[in-house]
Image (cartoon, rainbow, N blue to C red):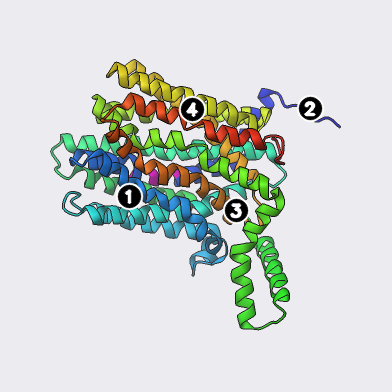
Amino acid sequence: MIEKKQSWSESILVYRDIRMLRILLLGAISGFPWVLIASSLSLWLKEEGLSRSTIGWAGLIFGVYAFNYLWAPLVDRIQIPYLSKKIGHRRGWIVLMQLIILLSLLIWSVINPTQNLALLIGVGLIIATASATQDITVDALRIEQINANEGKSMAAGAAVAVVGWWTGYKLGGVIALFTAEFFENVGIEDYWQSTFLVLGGIVILMNIALMFVHEPSNNLRQIKQSENDKLIEEKLGSSNKLSRFVAYISGTIGNPIISFFKKNGFTIAIWILGFVFLFKIGEAFLGRMSIVFYKEIGFSKGEIAIYSKTLGWITTVIFTLIGGVFAMRSGTIKTMFVAGGFMAATNLLFALLAWSGKSEWLFALAVIADDISAAFATVAFVAFISLLVDRTYTATQYALLASIGTAGRTTLASSSGALVDWLNGDWGTFFIITTLMVVPSLICLWFIKDKIVISGK
């Protein structure tokens, strides 16, 4: 039986599902911490007179996101005392991490960056770790809002999650930049420290809103995990406290990885991991240095907020939703090829901006094009890895795939500032290099496009 293809209007109606509103909030909760450790921290250090290389290397704190899969199995299974029983396993972990982020902002609000750079970066690392840990359970809770057989709803959910993430990041960035500029203009000396107190208020509001997100029962997941532990215990040939502990640890860490390779086959699994690692490296190099580039070329905080944040957010929201419909109709694989081509082309616009000098219309064009490509890329990427996971190990497998993708974007992109310095501030050549970084991932994708089995390919 041939399935009738949905019309555009029928595809768009998927977004009316009430579950999409919950996914939107979860995306915003996930995206907001990046306001703190990405644009706000970078500009704070820049205005304190630190070098591009220092700002770039400070971005190593993002490396935590590349390794959160290491403790994802524990997050998937360990219950938070009081919170897990009171508000649910997933929400309990999110609230705990949000409290850590809030406390970190209070510490930042009393730090002098030039005198306490190590402490400032250390607190930033704590925020990044809490955020990366939070993402493990946010992504699991988001995926569990949609049934495993709802491929089109998963694509729509991926789009809405991306809209939520960029809403948290872009609008949070607008608030951060305008608040910092306002405090600076009224004569507050430590205007960034005061800004972090305002951003702490947003964290509190997000935790209140989280209580309206439904958390499905985890009984079936726990039963399946226990059954797998039992199988390991039987293979050990004994039943005592030690064997049960070994079975628990082996099942918690090993079963999610074994399940992934068993489902896809070893060769295809390796190519999948290669694609996931490489796909957004070029975008990350550009993104890590973008706000420093904007500042050096002559744009003010207000102009950056309007063009890069506000205009960028509107563009991202519109084209993420369009990208979701495109993925529903054309499949995630084709959408990722389209997005890869967009990413390469838009990086060239930033090279043109670097060579032409400050130009508001070219700045707007580059930002719009970059946000369109990022929207399509992220929707397809999130849908792709969401459809790959085994629901018995949702948090662990998604965290594993997402963190491998993050590894390329964080560990390698941390050298972005050093690369600009090595090029003697030749931003145009830097952006050309980021364009070429897209190609290897598309080669990996071409190899697996006809071999991988996912719904709505």
Above or below 164: residue 58: below
Mark 3 neighbour density, 10 Å: few (under 14) some (14–19) many (20 or more): many
Which tag, 1 or 2, sits closer to the chain's start?
2
- Amino acid type at circle 2 is Lys
Secondary structure beneath label 4: helix
The residue wearing badge 3 is: 397
Tell me if 230 is positioned left or right of 116 in this view.
right
Which tag, 4 or 2, sits closer to the chain's start?
2
Q: How many angstroms separate mark 1 from mark 2 (CA)? A: 49 Å
The residue wearing badge 2 is: 4
Secondary structure beneath label 3: helix
Residue 321, quarter of the rendered image: top right
Residue closest to the far front: 422
Q: How many angstroms separate mark 1 from mark 3 (CA)? A: 31 Å
In the image, which residues are magenta? 31-36
On the image, the x and y values in percent for residue 91 come to 51, 57
Please name whichever residue, 444 or 256, is drawn nearer the observer in this view of the structure: 444
Q: Please give the name of the residue rendered at 44% of the width and 42% of the height, measured from the top-left corner.
A: 409
Regarding residue 165, the answer to whether it shows in the image is yes
Which tag, 2 or 3, sits closer to the chain's start?
2
Mark 1 neighbour density, 10 Å: few (under 14) some (14–19) many (20 or more): some
Q: Please give the name of the residue rendered at 49% of the width and 59% of the height, measured from the top-left corner.
A: 93
The residue wearing badge 4 is: 343
